[in-house]
Amino acid sequence: MSELTSVTGLHRGGPAGEPDLLGPRLQSFRRRAGLSQEVAASRAGISTRALRDIERGRVQRPHSRTLQRLAEALGLTGGELADLLDAARSGPPRGAGPPRLLILGPLSLQRGQTPVQVTSPRLRRVLGLLALKHPEPSTQQEITDTLWPSGPPSSHQSLIHTYVSQVRQLLGPGSLRTVPPPTVVRTPNGYQLEASRNHIDLGHFDELLDRATRQHRAQDPGAAYESLTQALQWWRGPVLADADPVLRQHPAAVAANERRVKAVLLHADTALQLGRPEEAVPVLWDMVGSEPLHEGLHARLILVLASCGEQAAALNVFSRLRDRLDEELGIAPSAEVRDAHLQVLRQQLPLAQRPVQPPPADRTALAGPHPAQLPARAGSCVGRRREMRELDDLVSPDPARRSHVVAVVGAPGVGKTAFAVHWAHARREQFEDGQLFVDLRGHSPLPTLRPGDVLAQFLRALGVPPDRLPADEDEAAALYRTLLADRQMLIVLDNARDAEQVRPLIPGAQGCAVVITSRSQLAGLVASDGARRLALDVLDPDEACQLLAGIIGECGVAADEEAARRLVRLCGGLPLAIRIAAANLVARNLGIADYCAELAGDDMLSRLRVDGDRRSTVRAAFDLSYRALPAAAQRMFRLLGLMPGPDLTVDGAAALADATSAESAGLLVSLTDTHLVQERAAGRFGLHDLLRSYARELVSREEAHAARQRLFDWYLDHTDAAGTAAGGADLGITCRALERPGVTVRVLGEPCRSS
């Protein structure tokens, strides 16, 4: 296949890959000539922006004299110029071919080059969801939550069928029937878009990104760069940029945006390696606009701008990012950004065509000072004696008892990081070669760290020069394991999102110990990687009072011990809440009883905050976990705040959420995995008091009314005429329930009265 016919991609005027699109042809001719956009435009006497607009399809029919000048600058033959002129005169075919779904930007449905109007908001939601999930099916519940985030109407089943039928009509065959057109098929649990990969722009992008990754691993930067350039041309903005938040924040949309960031980072690295930094500049500027706090993107932008001779602009990017991080998050730039800044100041910019080779597989990189990256301890650590003993198995002299990896898991605010750091400081002498620490930002307002970024950070800490860092993640992981072989090091991986994020960071050396903290259960690490799970719960009353005394002073607690116990009970034994309450007592010079009176009022969560510190709030900690949930799990969590008693069963939750028992069980398992819900006994699920208050804040009045009515009706369906559960069955609520005039529901042998 020739270079000309192999060019594919989505240029901003429409999809490429058609034989007569002007932009891809012109771009391939320019690259064949080995010219950058800037040089080619200068030789043709036009602006760089004009050339870029033609190549990206923004200008479909440029003047013939412009094409003639470009043909002279690129050394084209007469036949090649004639082809360009024909393409400019005819433009792309319109109204031909199967439908094409575009979701990498605003949602668009096209047939050939003719847009197909989709004006109904709910129809656009269904179409966007099906395309986003392709080739996986969308469940009935997922479609329902997408169409009606605040709760579906009673006729939602028939409405979904109607919308799916309308989508099928939109996707019906057009004038060309050379390939089967896309359609929507029924699955056991929902609907699935049945279409070939090239009918959706996301499919094209993923295919090109996979190809570029293979080419990069095969050390073919030129081919990888071409594939990456084509892949990124499919993007017109964030995924489903004009859709509702429920779709824009869908896990599949978030994952696709993360793959775009991965492609942009690799594109910039390859452009620097090939000595073509100017071509990476517009791509990076677009991305930092969408990801204003992504430090990896800013680091690349700093390097490519400086490599283009724009040192002042590069330094300005660093200054603005530093100020933004300080103002919005109260943190300093990462090591990656600081390294890029220093390279600009020292004029140590990447050299074109420099081979990226791993350093020799020896241990000379560790010849310098041993890394000691543990953060400061967060005050005293109270209680947790049993858990401390379990962590001590990491340093047990008995090989049969010794663990290699321990995952410390628990709910937000339960003190996982403080506990892990306290233990690490207490046992640091057991690890003579040092300690590595990283916040993986699994639940953070900052972008989650990729394993490759962490490996680069660790390798630099281990003494590997920045110019010898492997670009490939697998190569970096192999070098990391090599350098730690036969070493005794402690690695603390804080705030992990899931097992996949931490697997590349676990060394193979048995002399190293790994402590992971996470809000997830990390079941995959336990099942496949031999990790031991250590679950942290809230503090008991004595331990909670001890923590309070460690902050406000023992005299303050002893002066009013009853009020102190009431305060820690209001905080539910949650260490974060107790620390915030104690900080407020000290800062405001309040009595414990007075502060308890404040907290006992409405909006308790708003009072559990430290003024002037946006991260020191209980609500902020809960927000990070809630926002990471899929829409269906978010809805179930909100509704659980309405349960009349301390816990309920799967069937009780199903009644609240108008779901099947199977769907309810799946959602409860998902919420339990993130420690937002507790399984307190076999088949019974409940919420921590503060999480329950938080859930109630999130539910709307209409959603709450509908859920309570469903639960009430469910009670009546499961009780006899005397108001007693048939057969003494457990209806799933251990509390006072609801009542209709003349009917009293009796659950678990207790007479239940409505409020």
Image (cartoon, grey):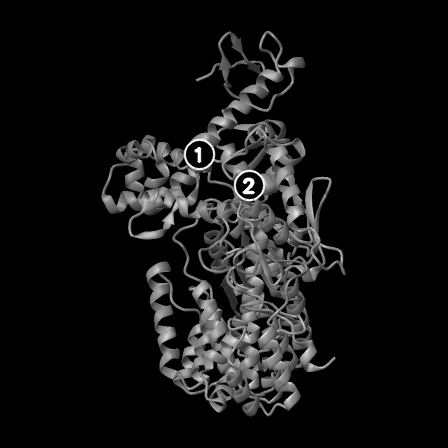
Q: Which is more toward the observer, 99 or 467?
A: 99
Q: In what element is the residue under mark 2? A: helix
Tell me, yes or no, if residue 137 can be seen here.
Answer: yes
Above or below: residue 274 compared with residue 530: below
Q: Quadrant of the C terminus?
A: top left
Q: Quadrant of residue 264?
A: bottom right
Q: Which residue appears at 49% of the width and 48% of the height?
A: 244
Type of the residue with mark 2: Leu
Mark 2: few, some, or many residues within 10 Å (few <14, many ≥20)? many
Kindly identify which residue carries mark 1: 700
Q: Spatial distance from mark 2 to mark 1, Cα to Cα?
A: 16 Å
Above or below: residue 214 compared with residue 104: below
Kindly identify which residue carries mark 2: 147
Type of the residue with mark 1: Ser
Say left or right for 326 vs 704.
Answer: left
Label ID, residue 410: none
- Whether the residues at callouts 2 and 1 have beta carbons within 8 Å, the answer is no
Tell me, yes or no, if residue 25 can be seen here.
Answer: no
Counting residues from the start of the chain, the first of labels 2 and 1 encountered is: 2
Q: Which is more toward the observer, 711 or 198?
A: 198
Q: In what element is the residue under mark 1? A: loop
